[in-house]
Image: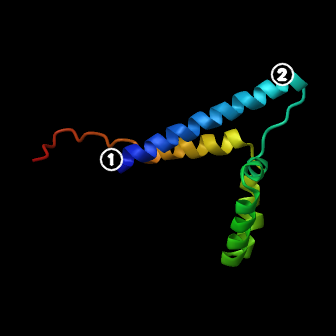
Amino acid sequence: MIRGFFRLIGLVLLAVGFIFLVYDGARYVADQTLRFTRLGQFWNDIHQSSQQAFRVWVDGFAPWLWNDVVRVILDQPVFAVLGIAGILLMLLFRPRKPLIGYARD
């Protein structure tokens, strides 16, 4: 049951990533300039104070982590981050292969 729930979350993340890919593509067709929506920019648009609170929490936990890992992820396009997260969830929680020649009683 939990496996199905995480696969559903992965599928939703993959679908939202595809929506952002279409959004960025439509913006390219309209403006003729290639601009991707960055994850940090999108997070600021949704809820700016939560991003600042997350930065304070990460700086308190491990100060090097913000510049080396989190900042790099926040500078990536939304469709790429959500697509990769969705694919990883779907792969990690895929159904098990049935065992051949083994009866479960």
Picture residue at 66% right of the left edge, 31% below the top: 19
Q: Is residue 93 visible?
A: no
Q: Residues within 10 Å of mark 1 (few under 14, many from 20)?
A: few
Q: Are marks 2 and 1 in contact (CB under 8 Å)?
A: no
Label drawn at residue 99: none
Expressed as whole percent of the image width and height from the top left, the position of residue 46 reads 72, 49
Q: Report which quarter residue 87 is drawn in.
A: top right
Q: Which residue is mark 1?
A: 1
User: Amino acid under label 1?
Assistant: Met
Q: Quadrant of residue 73?
A: bottom right
Q: Amino acid at mark 2?
A: Val
Q: In terms of secondary structure, where does tag 2 sit? A: helix
To which residue does mark 2 refer?
Answer: 29
Q: Is residue 25 visible?
A: yes
Query: Quick check: 2 above or below 18?
Result: below
How are the colours assigned in the image? rainbow
